[in-house]
Amino acid sequence: MTNHYIDLKNSDVILIMGSNAAEHHPLAFKWIMRAKDAGARVIHVDPRYTRTSARCDYHVPLRSGTDIAFLGGMINYIITNKKYFRDYVVNYTNASFLVNPDFSFKDGLFSGYDAKKRSYNKETWTFQNDANGVPLKDPTLEHPQCVFQHLKRHYSRYTLEKVSSITGVSEENLLKVYEEYSATGAPDKAGTECYALGWTHHTTGSQIIRTMSIIQLLLGNMGIAGGGINALRGEPNVQGSTDHCILYGNLPGYLKMPTASLATLGQYLKKNTPTCNDPQSANYYQNYPNFFVSWLKSLYGNAATPENEFGYSWLPKLNDGKHYSQLHLFDRMYKGGVKGLFAYGTDPAVSSPNTNKVRKALEKLDWLVCANIFDNETASFWFGPGADPKQIKTEVFLLPAAATMEKEGSQSNSGRWVQWKYKAATPPGDAISCGDIQIRMMDAIKALYAKEGGPNAESILNLKWDYKDRQGNMDVLKVAKQINGHWEADVEVVDAGQKKLFKKGGLVPTFGMLRSDGTTSCGNWIMSGSFGEDGENKMARRGKEDPTGLGLYPNWSFAWPVNRRIIYNRASCDIYGRPYNPKKKVLEWTGDKWVGDVPDGPWPPMADKEKGKYPFIMKTDGVASLFGPAMAEGPFPEHYEPLEGPLAKNPLSSQLINPTIELFSSDVDQVANASEKFPYVCTTYSCTEHWCSGALTRWQAWLLEMQPELYVEIGEELARELEIANGSKVKVSSARGEVTCIAMVTKRFRPFIIEGKTVHQVGLPFNYGWLYPKDGSDSTNFLTPSVGDANTFCPEYKAFMVNVTRI
Amino acid sequence: MKKTEYIKLIDTTRCTACRGCQVACKQWNEMPASRTRNFGSYQNPPDLQWNTWTLIRFQEHVDKNGDFKWLFRKDGCMHCTEAACIKVCPSGALYHTEFGTVGINQKLCIGCKACISACPFDIPRFNQETEKVYKCDLCYDRLKGGQQPACVLSCPTSAITIGEREAMIDKAYRRLDQLGGKGVVYGDKFVGGTHVMYILSEDPAVYDKLPVKPRIPASVILWKNLFKPFTLIGMGAVAGMAALHYLIKGPHEVHEKKEGDE
């Protein structure tokens, strides 16, 4: 979230799209109810009518996988009807920047496409610079090559008629949402967007979010109270695990994993440290070397020296152009290229796409180590349906793990609040925390390497590994302090004109003090400042003061970065630092300082041409990107159909599917687009009563009582056509597999009219597996394809094609 | 000892049907789960049971304007002031607590099921094994300890709240104003006022299993005034109850096997 949960109450219009907030964030939903109490409008756009829809002002159904078309139409509406917040757009975005004249977009493809590689050469996705290397701008936004005019041209194709025909949303409903939401372009109005897996689970997922970001920038909704783009993360600690690099391409704090071609630290830092010639851009990532070297110091301690490039050469490297997502992992495993797998707190035999492929892949492993609080379908795959234990060589270890309430540590919520929690109970039996499992395992591995050596042994032997308490268990505070960072030498710092000496071994108070010379260490720069230099654990703070009255609660826990509650908050003020909405003041420039939330840097507002800085300090140019060349698909999001959809042709261009997604081609990666055999659009989801794969909640009798078995939701019209009775058993099949389940015939799914034809959509939860309950059916992911977003490889669980038949 | 009279207000316009209340109730009251099947609805168990004292009823409804609505109603004991169940209970198992709510003492319950027949809301349920009747007691133990009922505490959107009688009735009507009069306050106009009230978004007649004009059956009044004293003293209570049951409802229905009717 750019903002945070409580801040939802400050919104005037809440668009819930790509999220079923009431069912999956039932506690957070109270802030949406508070906004509603205060008069906010709440709109739900979703393929099906859910418990969220029931509490919104209205629900608008759209066909799964057409969100970019829907939102692209909104961009067109905002520009055509001049609903954008002009001051904000001109000053705080790259709308006025002149684009490289060689940049183009034709028939669904941007300039530089390589069909063989399914990727782009981005050399034309750039700006025209002046003699100083600063982008040329046209603040009138009239220049035909400026970003704004490109944007206008691009989305002029997204007419109401076209969008309606793609999405299945009536023109009347499109206009209703567009009008209501774009009214938040007024300086004193705030619109926010809540999304979750309903947006990320698409081959175009990242670009859906980008499209909404463009809308929020056009309407001046970023950086303000009640605004922002708000990813509702979940109880699986998605926020915390992403912050701490669960994704293969990241290191802690979203630093980049090095690739093989970056052989030296110098090459790596040059590649990842942006430069900017505009003196008014803070370009905060110019500090990248400070964050990265401090991280190396935290990893290798005293062994990391300037002479050995702080151990850079010991880091494993990614092969250039290769990807290592879970999709790639199971593809390679299926082909016999993976020997062993650690699967901690996860149940991929249920939760990963294409269950047939995943379960077959597990059979190819030599060994599998699972750590969970209960047995699950992954640990037990070798005696599951269709598996012959005699034929399976995989040796499986199931380690009993402590549950979340059985250990102390931090949990990060979607609003970036890192909250400390204490152990409530001792784990039963032999169970220990996953951290303790890791510590013991690494101790053993280090001992083995010390004795026997091995490839890249220095990487293991030099690893700093002193996180144990006197009893030999993981000392979670030691880990947390290592993440915060330490001084590695006595250092004198000039802070606000005052000289101050920091002693070796002391805690670093903020990432602004991290250094690239080896005098600081920090396990995750964004978490620096989670401890005070006096040792106070700020994550454990529980102060309820609310000085702004906006619900920022600055003394409750620690929010990264530097306890900032609303990111990009300088954009809530005009170029002189005066709040756009004086009634909901996030920040205000008083002439010598900012007052309110922790500002995005101390510099004066940008009207001060000497010392002032632009508000989007993490962006190289200091402004937000309407034109976003970092994306794989292009600088402007474009609608492409899901990998499997009902249409043989994309109504907007000749490019049917996302031209940059990677296609897997094993014998079990079957695809059936626009096929008569699989005529119905299908989507998958979770339900309130179960959690993810259900591996934890299916064992809980009260929860199972409420949602006892797999079901498919089918609209009444389709059920009539197929003569399916409510509560009867049916088979749902795709080109990859099938499941049997109960038909839930409902008014909450309605057929769409797509390109003049009736298209039905159905949906299933993915919370069930064969292990327990025995009669609850099996994984919904037998149906889903192994394909993911081109930027993140997040699988397309939300749109594919199926058939439904009576049993 | 007269204590504060409480009302629990269920605002259906705030309910997200997360069913935290349904689980919290089972957890606090240590009620086991049943192995259910999906019968084509989110609603489960399909109906109230001896071990399910509260239940969210899910109902798909198209209103007069053709607008679709998914209605959620938390069903359970209404805790009537003029409580038919208490009037017919021959053993004193059902009683009014100092909070105005209807308590139940299973030790005294003789399993005659008269309350089941008499209840205008069809709430009490019989357990064949223990041969006793069960229902919500509005967490009498928690109220006594100064705590909110488990369902109230679990509710994330403040759809369920509890407070002193007058204040809650006032709150209900203020909420109705906030909703622009689009809704109905249910519970203060019959059976002497219930200690569980609803704010309904639709007319009461729309809701499954919700009586529009609940009242104590005339036979219960007759029973209370004429027969009850005699049976308790003289004839066998069970036989008397059986006679009464037949008088009010005819042959008994078995609740445990009833399917939900979404």
Image (tube, coloured by chain):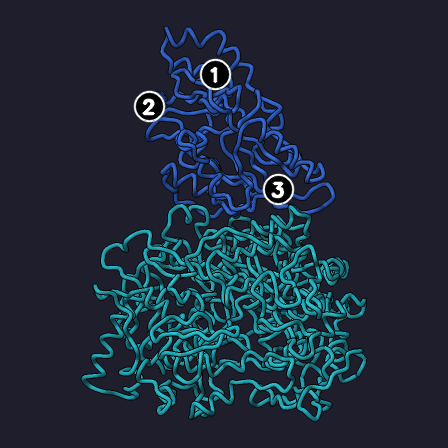
Residue nearer the viewer, A483 or A75: A483
Query: How far from the left and from the top, in percent, is residue A705?
Result: 42, 46
Output the letter for the chain in blue.
B
Do the residues under discs 2 and 3 have CB atoms within 8 angstroms? Answer: no
**In whole angstroms, how far apart are the C-alphas of marks 3 and 1?**
33 Å
Q: Residues within 10 Å of mark 1 (few under 14, many from 20)?
A: many
Query: Which mark sits nearer the N-terminus, 2 or 3?
Result: 3
**Front position among marks 3 and 1:** 3
Q: Nearer the viewer, residue A275 or B176?
A: A275
Hey, what amino acid is under mark 1? Lys
**Residue under circle 1?**
B87
Q: Which chain is cyan?
A: A
Given the image, on which type of amino acid does mark 2 rest? Lys
Cα separation, mark 2 vs mark 3, equals: 38 Å
* Residue located beneath label 2 in the image: B107
Q: Quadrant of the N terminus of chain A?
A: bottom right
Where does label 3 land, which residue?
A: B13
Number of marks drawn: 3
Chain letter for mark 3, please. B
Under circle 2, the secondary element is loop
Residue A354 in view of the camera: no
Looking at the picture, does residue B257 appear above or below residue A287? above
Q: Position of residue A203 (x, y in %)?
A: 57, 73
Residue A167's quadrant in the figure? bottom right
- Horizontally, is A533 left or right of A620 in the view? left
